[in-house]
Image: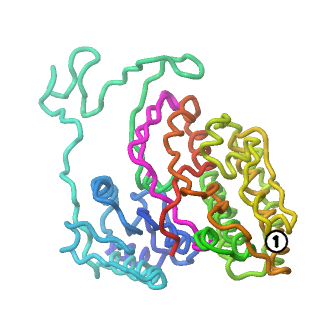
Amino acid sequence: MAVSWLSRLAARGPATVFPALGMQGEEAFYQLALHPEIELVDSPRHASLLLVAGGVPPELHEPLRRVHDQLPAPFTTLWYQSEPLLELQQAGVVRVDSLEALPDALVDAHRKVLRGELGVSPRLLVDEPPNPWRGLGDDGHGGEGMMGGVPYGRPMAMPPTQDLRDGLALDTLTFRLGPFFPLWPAGLEAEVILQGDIVQQFSVQSRPFPRAMSPVFFDAWEHAMSIARLERARVQYHLRALFHALHLAGLPDLAWRALRLAEACDRQTITALEKGFKDFERCLKRRGFFALHLPTCGTLNTEHAEALGGFAARAAGIEGDARRDDEGYRRLGFSAISQQAGDTQSRWRQRLAEVAQSLTLAARAQQNDAVTATTGVVETPRGVWRDERPGDASALLEKLLPGLEWGEALATIASLDVAGVSQWARP
């Protein structure tokens, strides 16, 4: 009776959803993050629903199965614009292709699964330890001698080298994260070796999914485009990135505020957006976002900054910006802005400075109905797009992250855009 009562009580609460993002699944994520009846959680063990949003390539089906089996019973899955795994197609899982219908479908599935009105997802993997140990070794517990084997399924800690930072020979921990880890780009999978809390090695196993840009950047590459629309889309892109950084920093109220401001870019007046952003920026400073939550680490050298391009290069003192060569932007008084340090903190200062600049440009462009004058080149938020779109730069993380503390490494990843630009525009 108590379990039944608790289940009914839990069904009245927000739908706890773990989002496994595939290709072009970000739009669903941002819409759901602001929904009052949905709570997006960072661990599958805290969820009643697994949402697979966007296409998942076959080579990532096995990691998806591992995420699926981590959800506690009872739970179910819902697939948004994605083909369910073959094993789940016979279980009657729900597929939704309409973004407008997705929130209601999640809330309904959450309530039904907790009330026992909906069949739960079956387990997909064999329940066995990754390191067999029973009956093995000297005493049948997997251990061999003083330091060998895998006693009780756990390899013995054997520090191979001294710590990169302070020389201590601490035990190492090797693990894999991704490709559905919510605190870094969707699709990125890496093998990490930690010694203490210091990253000894970071090896990319799969690259992040290409990031879909707003259609206005594709239109601007082909023909003249409203500068006001371009700059609104740029503001939205950077504010959405700031949402992830604030969430990582443990400031959820400011994260949601950044996302609400981002989602208002399509409908609010420029005057209202400027006022909202100025208030938000003052709040960031009062809460100590720069002083307390942004480490001065992850510094890009000139080679790496040039390879990334865009705001990351300008944060390292490289003033390249395709908007300087466009007559439409020059009439509005555009000039590139930059930082010098090239570290995590500088990149966020650069992003915020570019948001303020974009709002000013949008206001001027709106008064004059200004349009771009150059085709075949456009400055996207990720970098300049000329003959080719900005490509994947995730291999840079293998050189940039070793030697950083784990928290510093996560903050560094959040401050960068390492995913390439998709050939398809955002829906």
Residue 18 lies in the magenta-colored region? no
Label 1 environment density (alpha carbons within 10 Å; few <14, some 14–19, many ≥20)? some
Residue at 80 percent of width and 63 percent of height: 356
Quadrant in the picture for residue 19: bottom left
Residue 392 image position (x, y, % from top left): 50, 49
Residue at 52 percent of width and 65 percent of height: 212
Q: Amino acid at mark 1?
A: Glu
Residue at 87 percent of width and 64 percent of height: 333
Residue 38 image position (x, y, % from top left): 50, 74
Q: Which residues are magenta?
A: 188-216
**342 up-or-down from 225: above or below:** above
Residue at 67 percent of width and 79 percent of height: 266
Look at mark 1 in the image and give the residue it sits on: 274
Residue 295 image position (x, y, % from top left): 69, 40
Residue 99 horizontal side relative to residue 238, left or right: left
Quadrant in the picture for residue 92: bottom left
Quadrant where the N terminus lies?
Answer: bottom left
How many marks overall? Answer: 1
Residue 311 image position (x, y, % from top left): 69, 52
Residue 192 lies in the magenta-colored region? yes
Residue 204 horizontal side relative to residue 326, left or right: left
